[in-house]
Image (spheres, rainbow, N blue to C red):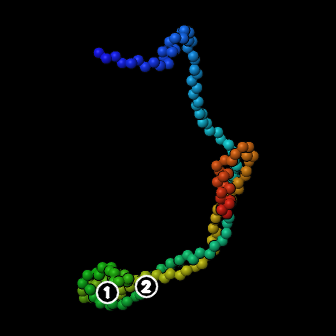
Amino acid sequence: MATRPVNRSNADEESNIPMRKIKPAVIPVIEEQATVSKRVIETGKVRIAKHVREYEEIVDIPHFQEEVNVERVPVNQFVEEAPKVRTDGDTTIVPILEERYVVEKRLYLVEELHVRKQRSESHVSQTVKVLKEEVVVERIPTDKPSGGHSKTNAADRHLHRQGG
């Protein structure tokens, strides 16, 4: 068998140094943790005032009126039986009967009442009172905490720069 040459390294040199007793070293392990918390910071107040204003307004209200016209139409004829109340278009016809003695008794149609409805529309302008609510919003700033701006105030400044 062939032998390999031995490669001498620093390990061989250290083996010539007498061994000392080595103390174990303590290495501290450090861990950082972030803590996040929230707190309420008052950046301003808002006062809202609601007022009810009363004013007059002219409104056009349709006004409907129905009239009934009664027309007496003479018929003057004998009938075998009493006619029924009937409707012809927008006219209601009501027969009026009487009994007459002749050698025999028969029905005699004296007249008919023709009843028509007429509907007319007119407009009457009237002044009525109307209520309207108006709201005023007023921002009341408070003392700001030092060291920064809140998001609300930054948004307000952004709106103010844009003219809003």
Q: Position of residue 29 (x, y in %)?
A: 57, 24
| Residue 125 point in image, percent of width and height | 60, 78
In the picture, measured across the screen, residue 65 lies left or right of residue 87, that is: right
How crowded is the residue under tag 2: few (<14 C-alpha within 10 Å), some, or many (20+)? Answer: some
| Quadrant including the C terminus | bottom right
Q: Is residue 97 above or below residue 145?
A: below
Residue ID for mark 2: 70
Q: In this figure, which residue is indicated by the disc labeled 1?
A: 109
Instruction: Name the residue: 59% across, 33% down.
Output: 34
Residue 23 higher or lower than 127, as above or below: above
Q: Is residue 161 visible?
A: yes
Which residue occupies the foreground of this view, 121 or 12? 12
Q: Nearer the viewer, residue 113 or 103?
A: 113
Q: Relative to 143, does residue 128 appear above or below in the rendering? A: below
Label 2 sits on a secondary structure element that is strand
Residue shown at the point (64%, 39%) measured from the top left: 39
- Percent position of residue 135, x then y: 66, 60
131 sits to left or right of 87: right
User: Residue 19 sits in which quadrant?
Assistant: top right
Q: Amino acid at mark 2?
A: Val
**Relative to 30, residue 99 above or below:** below
Asked if disc 1 and disc 2 are in contact, CB closer than 8 Å, the reply is no
Task: Residue at 65%, 62% (x, y): give it.
Answer: 162
Q: Mark 1 or 2 closer to N-term?
A: 2
CA distance separating discs 1 and 2: 18 Å
- The image shows residue 1 at horizontal and vertical percentages of 29, 15
**Badge number at residue 12:** none
Question: Callout 1: helix, strand or loop?
Answer: strand
Residue at far right of view: 143
